[in-house]
Amino acid sequence: MARVRFIGPEPVTVPELGPERVVQPDEVVEVPDERFEGYVCQTTNWEAVEEPKAAATVKKTTAAKSAPQKEG
């Protein structure tokens, strides 16, 4: 599970997180990894706190593959 912070000005209901789930401003909530991008792309309402574990692994692997290789 990934974690995001709600930075909107007023509480919102987020049914995806549970029936009648209300998220307060500045509250950190856990969201399914596959939905993480759907939250953080809404930059006026949500900010990333902890990325999905799989995404962090992919970024490290991609960075390692794109690093310059020594010739020798």
Image (cartoon, helix red, strand yellow):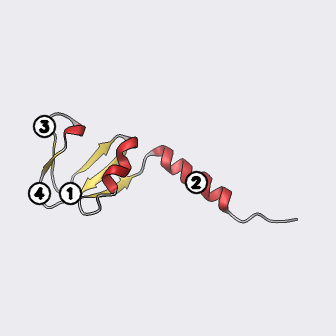
Q: Percent position (x, y) of residue 42? A: 29, 58
| Residue 45 marker | none
Marks 1 and 4, how far apart at CA: 10 Å
Say whether residue 59 is visible.
yes
Callout 2 amino acid: Lys
Taking the image as shown, residue 69 lies to the left or right of residue 42, namely right
Q: Which residue is mark 4?
A: 10
Tag 1 residue: 26
Q: Which residue is mark 3?
A: 20
* Residue located 23% across and 59% down the image: 45
Between discs 3 and 4, the one toward the N terminus: 4
Along the polypeptide, which appears first: circle 4 or circle 2?
A: 4
Disc 1 + disc 3, Cβ < 8 Å: no
Q: Nearer the viewer, residue 23 or 41?
A: 41
Q: Which of pointers 1 and 2 lies earlier in the amino acid sequence?
A: 1
Label 1 residue SS: loop
